[in-house]
Image (cartoon, helix red, strand yellow):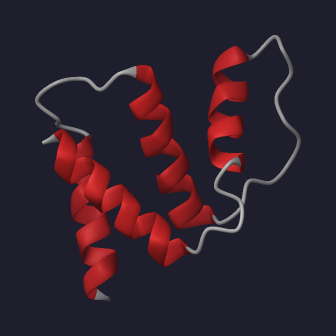
Amino acid sequence: MSDLRAQFEAAAKAAQSLPKRPDNATLLELYALYKQATSGDAGGSRPGFTDPVGRAKYDAWAKLKGTQADKAMHDYIALVGRLK
């Protein structure tokens, strides 16, 4: 396992037990970076207006289109580090 992957997985674990719950914008950023790092570009259709949470998550993820997985992992690790 690569060092970056190990750091990413440790950050994902740490994100589950942050001392303070982040605001919604930060939660969306965490979600989007995690999905981009693990799944690549957003796929499928955008959720409809009856699913505002799903739509917000999809939009946050779609903004990262084209971002390489390694960069998304680095950004995720840095963000979790700032939140600790």
Residue 76 relative to residue 66: left or right: left
Residue lying at 31% horizontally and 67% vertically, measured from the top left: 8
Question: 64 or 45, which is in the foreground?
Answer: 64
Residue 7 relative to residue 42: left or right: left
Residue 63 relative to residue 27: left or right: right
Q: Is residue 30 above or below residue 53?
A: below
Q: Is residue 63 visible?
A: yes
* Residue with the most extreme bottom position: 2
Q: Quadrant of the N terminus?
A: bottom left
Q: Position of residue 69 (x, y in %)?
A: 53, 73
Question: 72 or 38, which is in the foreground?
Answer: 72
Quarter-of-image position of residue 47: top right
Q: Quadrant of the C terminus?
A: top left
Residue lying at 70% horizontally and 16% vertically, measured from the top left: 52
| Tally of marks | 0
Q: Is residue 14 visible?
A: no
Residue lying at 25% horizontally and 44% vertically, measured from the top left: 15
Q: Is residue 10 above or below residue 28?
A: below
Residue 38 relative to residue 73: left or right: right
Q: Position of residue 24 (x, y in %)?
A: 44, 22
Q: Position of residue 67 (x, y in %)?
A: 61, 68
Q: Position of residue 30 (x, y in %)?
A: 42, 44
Quarter-of-image position of residue 55: top right
Q: Is residue 55 above or below residue 80?
A: above
